[in-house]
Image (tube, rainbow, N blue to C red):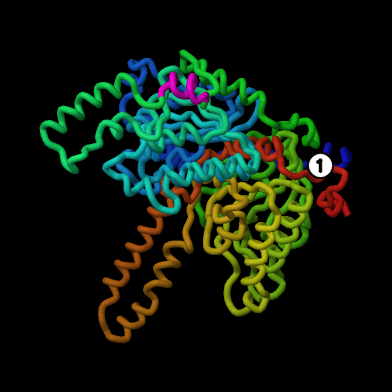
Amino acid sequence: MRPYFEKLEPFGKDLTEGQKKSGEQNVKEIREVEKTVAEAIEAVKNAGIPAEKIKKRGQMTVWERIEYLIDPGTWCPLHTLYDPLFNEEGTTGVIDGLAKINGKWAVVIGFDNKVMAGAWIAGQADNQLRVTDMAKRLHVPLVWLVNCSGVKLPEQEEVYANRRGNGTTFFRHAELEKVGVPILAGIYGTNPAGGGYQGISPTMLIAHKDANIAVGGGGIVSGMSPKGYFDMEGAEQLIEATRHFKEVPPGSVPIHHNETGFFKEVYDTEQGVLDALKKYMDMMPAYDPAFFRVAEPKEPRFPGEDLDYLVAFNQKRSYNFDEVLSRIFDNSEHMEFRPGYGPEVYTGLAKIDGFLVGFIGNRQGFLGAKYPEYADYMGIGGKLYRQGLIKMNEFVTLCGRDRVPIVWFQDTSGIDVGDIAEKAELLALGQSLIYSIEQTDVPMICVVLRKGTAAAHYIMGGPTANNHNAFTLGTPMTEIYVMHGETAAAASFARRLVKEKDAGRPLEPVIDKMNELVKEYYEKSRPVYCAKRGFVDEIVSLPLLRKYIAAFAGCSYQNPTSICPQNHMMIPRIIKG
């Protein structure tokens, strides 16, 4: 198959000086959003007590632990801004992302020991479930840096119970181990109750000398009162018991290394624990990347910084999506699938870091006077029509057959509507695409380049594809809503306007409410808001998209659960004809 993959079709052009000049305002608007995102990230990094206080205790922060653990330059953070319940901490209390450790990809997550000593806080459970889902979908090791003081007791109802409470993580750990995904844990500090299960549920436990894991911590053991209430005598007993358990907490190294043997290894230094995790990562199952690469990796022929000039910040302006892709693919080459059919959608194969990946995305601009073929109106890029939906169904199904991971690029205003579109079966073809995705069983990610709108956001590999979507990225231009704010206001208040007009009453109060709804839609669709609510898993600058896609490809091909031999693949043969 080498002739198919070594040299693909080149595409893309250098930016002209005129394009750079006219794009300066575009870049400026992008930088303003990036500044807002950077400020929000900095607030998360500064959450909790100062880092200096942690260091005075002789400890490393979670950020320092991750930096020491991972291979330089490979960190792809995810869920940094995730805070779905907008809690007072401003963070879920865990930090996670993709990274290489000793040359192998892993999902890495650690408790932020600056925030209530790594306690369970509101929103954390869903963050942990996203991470375990990602490790399962990508079939790569999950590496935990455990430092969890248990439940934030004054808000226990936000974290302890419920179908997706923090305890669900331990079932997810068992599920990962059942399907052959190992979990490595480096354990620090005091980890009682839920923190104890965070420590015991992984596959391999590596502990710091001062670490402990226990069903109940000193505070629980010493806090039992047979009277059912506390008085002075009880308070004195509590003080004495607390002092004892502070000196000798339950489940310390002498118990879980010397007696139970749960701690596989124990180290005197924090770095020693991290070095041991690196050692065990060497033992993890992984193919040599050369086994799956179809060609030697090559950088795109055009700089990634061009993307800030190419992708229009103004949502009402179009741009050349193919030029965007040429800044992402290896050597700016691709194999487009059915280029003359369904022109509103790009589908094709390309190489990322030498690995074969399927790409699907929305093209922009006018599509010609005779398209869509079933209607007497002109098609506009970003909207989905019959041919485009059929083409995506075909391509997704073939990617599943050939075991090719898929990257979706969304910039969509939705699916064509009206009786003409209904007669063209668009409703059913959209659901058919969901079925096609569900039956493929290959990893996918989604990039909401600009608009993620209406049902198109679902059917184009969005985060609702729970069994397939490993993660979703946003950009400084991302907006996600069921429809544009102006459209929503018109849909919500049109009948009210008619009623007020017919009654001879003033329209201004209704118009004011319409404008309030437009403003609310705008504020609740901005990139930082989308990241906090979890509509996207991270906001990424455009030039960094290739890095994340390369990480996804590397994970997908590191230890796949099924393989299609290259000489059995059909997509390149179908493209060539």
Q: Position of residue 41 (x, y in %)?
A: 41, 35
Q: Is residue 15 visible?
A: no
Q: Name the residue nearer the viewer: 293 or 217.
A: 217
Q: Is residue 5 above or below residue 500?
A: above
- What is the three-letter code of the residue carrying label 1? Leu
Q: Is residue 278 visible?
A: yes
- Considering the numbered disc 1 on the image, is that residue within a helix, a strand or a loop? loop
Q: Main secondary structure of the magenta part?
A: helix
* Residue extending furthest toward the top: 268
Residue at 78%, 49% (x, y): give it. 402
| Quarter of the N terminus within the rendering | top right
* Residue extending furthest toward the bottom: 502
Residue bearing the label numbered 1 = 8
Q: Name the residue nearer the viewer: 356 or 568.
A: 568
Residue at 53%, 38% (x, y): give it. 541
29 to the left or right of 311: left
Q: Is residue 325 above or below residue 115?
A: below
Displayed quadrant of residue 366: bottom right
Magenta includes 318? Answer: no
Q: Name the residue nearer the viewer: 204 or 537.
A: 204
Neighbours of disc 1 within 10 Å: few (<14), some (14-19), many (20+)? some
Count of numbered marks: 1
* Residues in magenta, as a range: 252-261
| Quarter of the C terminus within the rendering | bottom right
Q: Position of residue 92 (x, y in %)?
A: 40, 40
Displayed quadrant of residue 35: top left
48 to the left or right of 343: left
Displayed quadrant of residue 210: top left
* Residue extending furthest toward the left: 232
Q: Position of residue 132 (x, y in %)?
A: 54, 42
Q: Is residue 292 above or below residue 312?
A: above
Residue at 43%, 24% (x, y): give it. 188
